[in-house]
Amino acid sequence: MPDVSVSSAPTVIASPETPTEAPPRAAQALAVKRVAIDTWKENVAYLHRDCAVYRAEGFQALSKVEVRANGRRILASVNVVDDASIVSCEELGLSEDAFAQLGLEDGHAATIQQAEPPASIAALHRKINGERLDREAFERIVADIAAHRYSKIELTAFVVACNRGELDREEVYFLTEAMVHAGRRLDWREPLVVDKHCIGGIPGNRTSMLVVPIVAAHGLLCPKTSSRAITSPAGTADTMEVLAEVALPFERLAEIVREHRGCLAWGGTAELSPADDVLISVERPLSLDSPGQMVASILSKKLAAGSTHLVLDIPIGPTAKVRSMPEAQRLRRLFEYVADRLRLSLEVVITDGRQPVGYGIGPVLEARDVMRVLENDPRAPNDLRQKALRLAGRLIECDPDVRGGDGFAIARDILDSGRALARMQAIIEAQGRKPFDPEHPPLGALQFEVRAAADGVVTGIDNLHIARIARLAGAPKVAGAGVDLAVKLGEPVRRGDLLYRVYAGYAADLAFARQAAERDGGYQIGSASAVPHVFVEF
Amino acid sequence: MPDVSVSSAPTVIASPETPTEAPPRAAQALAVKRVAIDTWKENVAYLHRDCAVYRAEGFQALSKVEVRANGRRILASVNVVDDASIVSCEELGLSEDAFAQLGLEDGHAATIQQAEPPASIAALHRKINGERLDREAFERIVADIAAHRYSKIELTAFVVACNRGELDREEVYFLTEAMVHAGRRLDWREPLVVDKHCIGGIPGNRTSMLVVPIVAAHGLLCPKTSSRAITSPAGTADTMEVLAEVALPFERLAEIVREHRGCLAWGGTAELSPADDVLISVERPLSLDSPGQMVASILSKKLAAGSTHLVLDIPIGPTAKVRSMPEAQRLRRLFEYVADRLRLSLEVVITDGRQPVGYGIGPVLEARDVMRVLENDPRAPNDLRQKALRLAGRLIECDPDVRGGDGFAIARDILDSGRALARMQAIIEAQGRKPFDPEHPPLGALQFEVRAAADGVVTGIDNLHIARIARLAGAPKVAGAGVDLAVKLGEPVRRGDLLYRVYAGYAADLAFARQAAERDGGYQIGSASAVPHVFVEF
């Protein structure tokens, strides 16, 4: 007899009753049916309560199941149906997205089985318990996330466990790298691929639509893809969409970039860092935006897009995402560390985030501001022009033939000479022009005005509240909705002077925006000495 | 001009276009329709994509909305429907549970609006960021959780943020107290209301069904409510249900308790600590069971049920929830601290959790074991009998008329004399007897056997794996399915001897259970010296 315990590899002896012909229950086929319900990023499988598979498998409502058909497999949560007109006992209903992912006709056979828990769940538990994870653990977790193998609950657990100081900087590097690996990575086959990015939070900050035509006109490759607004009144993709098509097949985008050295497109079609999109689906409702997650999200997208040089804009101000210089510096160092490990040339610029940039907030209003800057219109917002020139200047200095310090002047020449406008028109044409007259921008037909209640100087404009009013007014869904600022920080006003005008497309939207503006106008009026200072680079 | 900034309480001046008659969009009425889909604990509102409210409100799929009708309000997530036969543009579809919660007829008018985020979200964010919360913050969070105001994402964030050392013992007390306050609290109007509870994890551990009739026969009030199995092959409610009805209206339960001094019912009807049920819906899929959450969950249920004295069973063993004595002692001290603050008299007993208790695992098999103990049948499992007697003895010693140390003997007399069996029969009769013959328990018709692969002594039985095999065989859904152990720890076996028999009701279940048993039988056979020791109280 051995001295140590041994595992007893059991002899399993079938009793006579055992029906050995029993098919493994994994393989019962049903006919797929598209159920015309949009469940957003959650795949749902609808099974009739009396369906044999449902009964045999012991699925519960919300069980995670794997649906296989035609060589593809998707994961879904089960909803149990008691109405045969929605799905019958022989059918497997799939929500719209889930149905589309399988890419089948109605009636095609599919099998369904309990989904195995994702292989990386053990690593997730180590993170929940506060352990440091290694590169391999991040690779496995992120691969499972990108493949939609995590439930909302598991995603949230990962995001919360990685929040606040829980990731050291090397872990942020591992996470970023894993997020790049989890998707497609573009290779432009050029030594210099430039991009700019802002960490967000400042309404009206549409510098990309100026920087891209300027640096592309200089000759740098700048294949800019952007997101649509998620919590803001307009993203670059929403604003560009006022002027041109932005949802282009990737191959078309690549052609445009080769011809014009730049584009301004929506990034949703490129499958870059798909894990990021999944993580955002839980970070957003929780308003979680920890430094580690922000760095991994931004840098993974840029690396996947093939960027070699990035200028990153970190605005600071009392109502910006980053509110103090020490905080901005900590964030800068984390970005620099991770970019360095991943061999991305990164320049971080800390900018003035005390108020919105430009005048207009909302897609049409922002497109108007951008076009005025490109056209050297005297009504163009100077802060937007200056900021775009400085960012473009930094990127132009990535060009080895440009002397340090010359970038700004080169950018200004390109803008003032009309070459930036010409390049923008070429890009608009290539992407597919939409009718837009900057003299008569298609603004919402309904409006109200907000006026100063006292004499004084504008000492504060609340980025968050102005953005909220613009969203309530309908932006970005209603492109012509938004807020048009009449005065900016430090400017004098008298009681009754116009502060801003709000545009809406629908009466109900207007009423909601007005309620919010009545509760709090978002402006502070005081003495000139009360205007907050920020010490920023430009 | 004032010296400090003042908020500019703006004059909002309506432009002529402003339709002041615009109804606030909060109040658009739709006709409710029951959509026969069971979405489990998630309320879902189905809105047609072309529905005016959906378009006006700018809901997204998965937006959280508030539905009001008839003075009631519920929260739900939106699913967008593209098929008018499911819901039309004039209808508001509700999933089965959501419809039931509103308690209306089809076609009744209801309004829908964007739900305000729960008021306690700020406190949740403080916890996510690692702050200590005070009593009031826990009260607000738990009240919102109990009212189903938290999304799955927010619930998960709370649970993960409270995990692992993140709650100090006073916070666990605050959380427990808040969970008691969030639901109904029973008052039996007696000075001594006893209960027993086990932290779980040990298959076959059905001591409650012995302890209740023993202590009730002694005269103590023991209104035992239990849960059904969630991840185990049988809960006390599932096993009792083999013998009697367990889903009784609360008033009927109270009558039975008054007459027989005890009951063995399902706790789902009593609305005790409702926040606990909600939290479990995310803790369970994550397999999170941190000490703080375990203490708050168990003690809040017991306090809400009106218990004054509790004996708590903490089993330890290599495959139990608690695996070492220091861990068990830490957990004991946390239970004791919180019980003390809440004036619950608590006795913690640390027990042998190295293997399943009794022979049978699964509702019918466990009911058979319990009845054999009550009937003093020589085939009764002695470990189950001894453990139940000791736990009952501790509870009996809560009786001020019983001398310390006499409890065990009193319990044994009650059991041996048949008084425990008589009391059990009375409780079964009162709850509603079901036909059950312990000589011919209604076991699953299909079976297979697992036999020893070597000579030796049983040195290990894996609680987790045996439970998994029993569940795969169909327990607890198929009451007659499960595992019947033939040998226990320390017993000698020869190659080919029966280790256990598995029963199933369906061929597919049997095949799955067999696969698992072939991969790993769950038994270790080795030398007698390799049997692990535990140092437990009894």
Image: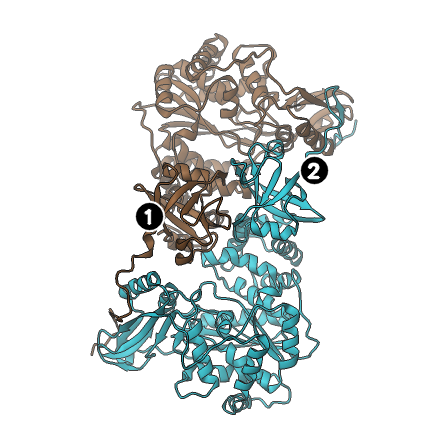
Chain colours: A brown, B cyan
Q: Is residue A472 above or below residue B422?
A: above
Q: Are marks 1 and 2 in contact (CB under 8 Å)?
A: no
Residue B352 position in % (x across, y down): 42, 77
| Placement of the N terminus of chain B among the 4 image quadrants | top right
Question: Which residue does the image show at 43% across and 30% down from the upper left?
Answer: A268
Q: Chain of mark 1?
A: A
In this picture, is B45 found above or below B136?
A: above
In front: A190, or B81?
Answer: B81
Q: Which mark is residue A136?
A: 1
- Answer with left or right where residue B469 lies relative to residue B68: left
Circle on res. B27: 2
Camera sees residue B538? no
| Image vertical order of residue A247 relative to residue A30, above or below | above
Chain of the residue under label 2: B
In this image, A254 relative to A43: left or right? Answer: left
Q: Amino acid type of disc 1?
A: Glu
Crowding near pointer 2: few (<14 within 10 Å), some, many (20+)? few
Depth check, front residue: A498 or A347: A498
Residue lying at the far top of the rendered structure: A417
> What is the secondary structure assignment of the residue under circle 1?
helix
Residue B169, position as x, y percentages in the image: 57, 64
Residues at discs 1 and 2 both on one chain: no
Residue A386 is drawn in which quadrant? top right
Q: Secondary structure at mark 2?
A: helix
Q: Residue at x 62, y 47 (%)?
A: B75
Q: Is residue A128 above or below residue B510?
A: above
The amino acid type of the residue labelled 2 equals Ala
Residue B40 position in % (x across, y down): 52, 53
Q: Position of residue A208 (x, y in %)?
A: 48, 22
